[in-house]
């Protein structure tokens, strides 16, 4: 059997859906001694983290990405490119020891386009997206049929693993929990943008909500809670994916200042927001895991989370404060206590730092991932 360090690993994210995660995992696997290539497409929403110690190739969707985000032809062209690109990917994987898929662009079609399994070359899939609700039995059966094409399924939380075993009905031996690591590339960007002058001038405590604005994220509950607080500002930063009028109405009732930054926040602007925030508030009603949470952990921020899904597991480690989802009174009490007591914020910051120095850190994640590949027989052809 070749040593783990000799493993040739291909990570695949055809549509460049999660380039920070892909690249941080690839870098960690490379530091552990694996020969890693990330196979993806050009990311259209800004620069992706630089590659260190691994190779990247972008064979997917070359024509459609060349058209740019503003082209109405981009998605039709991408659809035409998809099947040929997936077939090319099969040839790229011929010589590797592990094919680790992060995403599939068109899952029902891709199940057929993956091709036959190769002896000694395990096929792994990381489930980044939420599963259908328990009452959506047909959708759950489709998930089962798709995931049966893989030798192992990686999820980031124990609650996600329980759903795969119970609701989807996967063989428990195929389900493996490996945490999501911190988005720590944000802490050392080659260039950071300062806060806008109106934000830089704020002197008091700041509570930050960051990320796409969606109904399930509990922004309305956050605004209701903030209406009960004094002595802090609330910043809500991110691209709206919901009507904004109800949020502005709730904000108007608060005695403190609410500032909206309703737009896409590129990477260079994120560090200044994170560093300035005294508390990061993510009172989601439903979630398994979140990139924003892992950005907050990277900056060791005091975080308040809705007690749902994988968020509960982060809170159980002492890396965040949990509140019942939708409970404005409990959220207000947690925020008020953290705003008023620096020692409580420092305790949560220390818990976040311990988590990412331990099994939430990328080196630990890489070691667990390589151990999984080994158990699956990678490199034994």
Image (cartoon, grey):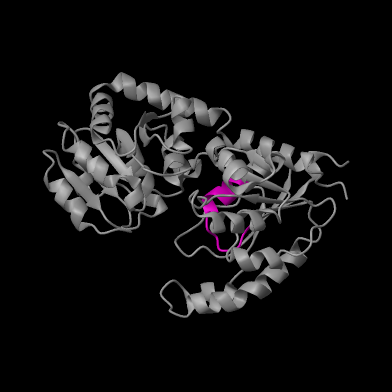
Say which quarter of the image contains residue 243.
bottom left
Out of 167 and 146, give the one closest to the viewer.
Answer: 167
> Is 157 left or right of 221, judged from the image as shown?
right
> Is 18 left or right of 347, judged from the image as shown?
right
Magenta stretch holds residue 105? no
Q: Looking at the picture, how far across and down is residue 337, in whole percent?
A: 25, 24
Q: Looking at the picture, how far across and down is residue 187, in whole percent?
A: 45, 40
- Which segment did they paint magenta? 12-25
Q: Which residue is drawn at 36% across and 33% down?
A: 303
Say which quarter of the image contains residue 200.
top left
Q: Looking at the picture, how far across and down is residue 127, in whole percent?
A: 58, 49
Out of 137 and 239, give the one closest to the viewer.
Answer: 137
**60, above or below 123, in the image:** below
Q: Looking at the picture, how far across and down is residue 194, in whole percent?
A: 31, 47
Report whether residue 59 is seen.
Answer: no
Magenta stretch holds residue 20? yes
Q: In which quarter of the image is the N terminus?
A: top right
Q: Residue at x 48, y 37 (%)?
A: 310
């Amino acid at each position: 059997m070749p040593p783990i360090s000799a493993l040739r690993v291909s990570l695949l994210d055809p549509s460049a859906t999660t380039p920070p995660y892909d690249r941080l995992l690839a870098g960690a696997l490379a530091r552990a001694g694996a020969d890693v290539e990330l196979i993806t497409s050009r990311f259209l929403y800004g620069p992706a983290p630089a590659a260190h110690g691994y190779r990247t190739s972008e064979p997917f969707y070359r024509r459609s990405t060349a058209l740019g985000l503003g082209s109405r032809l981009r998605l039709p062209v991408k659809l035409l490119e998809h099947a040929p690109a997936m077939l090319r990917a099969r040839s790229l994987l011929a010589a590797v020891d592990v094919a680790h898929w992060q995403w599939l662009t068109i899952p029902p079609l891709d199940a057929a386009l993956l091709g036959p399994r190769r002896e000694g070359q395990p096929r792994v899939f990381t489930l980044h997206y939420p599963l259908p609700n328990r009452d959506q039995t047909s959708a759950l059966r489709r998930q089962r049929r798709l995931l049966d094409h893989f030798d192992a399924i990686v999820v980031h939380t124990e609650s996600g693993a329980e759903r795969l075993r119970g609701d989807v009905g996967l063989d428990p031996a195929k389900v493996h929990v490996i945490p999501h690591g911190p988005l720590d590339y944000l802490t050392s960007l080659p260039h950071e943008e300062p806060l806008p002058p109106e934000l830089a001038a704020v002197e008091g405590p700041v509570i930050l909500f960051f990320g796409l604005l969606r109904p399930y994220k509990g922004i309305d509950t956050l605004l209701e809670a903030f209406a009960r607080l004094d002595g802090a500002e609330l910043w809500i930063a991110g691209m709206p994916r919901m009507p904004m009028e109800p949020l502005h109405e709730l904000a108007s009732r608060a005695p403190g200042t609410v500032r909206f930054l309703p737009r896409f926040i590129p990477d260079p602007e994120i560090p200044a927001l994170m560093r300035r925030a005294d508390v990061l508030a993510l009172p989601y009603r439903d979630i398994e895991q979140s990139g924003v949470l892992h950005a907050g952990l990277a900056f060791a921020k005091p975080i308040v989370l809705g007690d749902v899904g994988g968020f509960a597991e982060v809170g159980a480690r002492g890396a965040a404060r949990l509140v019942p989802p939708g409970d404005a009174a409990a959220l207000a009490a947690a925020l008020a206590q953290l705003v008023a007591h620096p020692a409580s914020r420092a305790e949560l910051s220390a818990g976040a730092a311990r988590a990412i120095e331990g099994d939430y850190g990328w080196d630990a994640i890489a070691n667990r991932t390589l151990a999984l590949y080994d158990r699956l027989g990678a490199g034994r052809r």
